[in-house]
Amino acid sequence: MSFMTSKFRSKEEMFFEVGYSQLSKKNEELCGDSIAVVESDDSLIVVCSDGLGSGVKASILSSLTSKMASTMLQQGCTLEEVIETLAYTLPVCEIRGLAYSTFTILQIMRDGRAYLAEYDSPAAYYGNQKQLIEFPRHERVIGERLIHEALLELKPGDWICLISDGILHAGIGGIWNLGWGAERVGSFVQHVAGKGEDAVSKALEVTSVVNKLYAGQPGDDASVVFVHTRLPRLLNMMFGPPRERSLDLEVVRRLMENPGKKVACGGTTANIVARELGKELRVDLLSMDEKVPPTADIEGIDLASEGMLTVSYAIDKIRSGMRVHDVAYLRDGASRLAALLLEADWIEISVGLTLNPAHQSPDLPQSLALKNKVVEDLVQALEQRGKSVSVNYY
């Protein structure tokens, strides 16, 4: 199971991207670890909890812990109030002397300050790009619970990785007699974090190795959460020609002057962009697909594609839940468009209001009948993937 949150924006224009991946213990349908990711007015809150045991009981205990902690912090409660509430709600097991549920809490403020609290859970990893960074922790007793705390100042390129015990124990009794271990896990996390992938892909790579170390039969629930700090990625998309030719230059100028990558969707649109830029348009026949028309090359434009059909197929790919690396090496226009849209955080779409009579044919699928419907579907699909989208009509 994997997940990516909507990206949290800081005052310094940083983005905090969160992704996680989990494995359930063998023969268990439910994972005994729980992860909660919520936003308050001024912070992003991530809670990773590990319930005692496995299966339904562990899942209930960890879910209660993660939901309670994240909700209370979201409502402005202090950590002391959260810990005391959890202490009364989830007492220590008298027989085994273990907490019914351990947890790690990460709270990131919009100015980049981060607070980390760990209770009986594996230590989190912190670094910048390919570098693993040691940081001081302080001990504090709250509600008779020993908490390890740390304060961090995050900047672009920083990352934090939270894990549960199942990650450390991977391979125990097999490939590694004593399990994967904190040091080896740290080295691998450092390697993964240095790649230019999204947070979910990083998390999935860790659990993929964990599953192999367990020989496909996890001996414990395993969870990994990546929080990646970076500058936002921008994309500008021109879709269709403006209603009046006099607006062509204005729309193309806006496309080129805005920071970020540039996309022109529609044959007429691509010709307008090439004409206004004084650049040559060259059709790339090698990009032709059974369903998708070929793309074109225009200097200064990252992608020039056909319009309605290509955008519709790109929407299907985005809705399918695929990630950037699933389509990054495909050459057809829909895959390239989907990859560019999935890479971006902020997307501005300039929609031309000129109607193409061919798109109003009753013989075409309803999804292609009107450009506005396609734009609405695209915006909805992108927002569901955590993108910020603005639309302008010309």
Image (cartoon, rainbow, N blue to C red):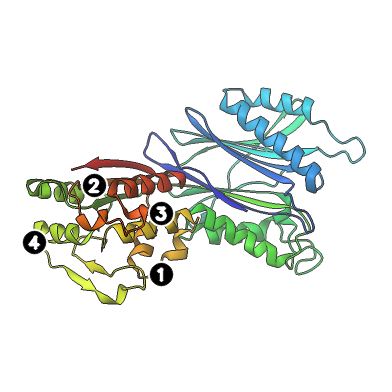
- Left or right position of 205 against 336: right
Q: Is residue 263 visible?
A: no
Asked if labels 1 and 4 touch by Cβ distance under 8 angstroms, the answer is no
Q: Is residue 23 above or below residue 84?
A: below
User: Circle 3 — which element?
Assistant: helix
Nearer the observer: mark 2 or 3; the answer is 2
Type of amino acid under label 4: Gly
**Mark 2 or mark 4: whose residue is earlier in sequence:** 4
Type of amino acid under label 3: Leu
| Coordinates of residue 332 in the picture (x, y in percent) | 35, 69
**Foreground of the two, 59 or 114:** 59
The outermost residue toward the front is 362
User: Circle 2 — which element?
Assistant: strand
Q: Real-space Cα distance between discs 4 and 1? A: 30 Å
**Mark 2 or mark 3: whose residue is earlier in sequence:** 3
Which quadrant of the structure image shows residue 277? Answer: bottom left
**Foreground of the two, 85 or 111:** 85
The outermost residue toward the right is 95
| Coordinates of residue 268 in the picture (x, y in percent) | 17, 59
Residue 351 is marked as 2
Q: Real-space Cα distance between discs 2 and 4? A: 22 Å
Q: Residues within 10 Å of mark 4 (few under 14, many from 20)?
A: few
Type of amino acid under label 2: Val
User: Residue at the location (46% across, 47% down)?
Assistant: 385
- Left or right position of 11 against 122: left
User: Residue at the location (35% across, 42% down)?
Assistant: 389
Q: Residues within 10 Å of mark 1 (few under 14, many from 20)?
A: few
Q: Residues within 10 Å of mark 2 (few under 14, many from 20)?
A: many
Q: Label 1, on which residue?
A: 329
**Foreground of the two, 145 or 354:** 354
| Coordinates of residue 150 in the picture (x, y in percent) | 60, 37
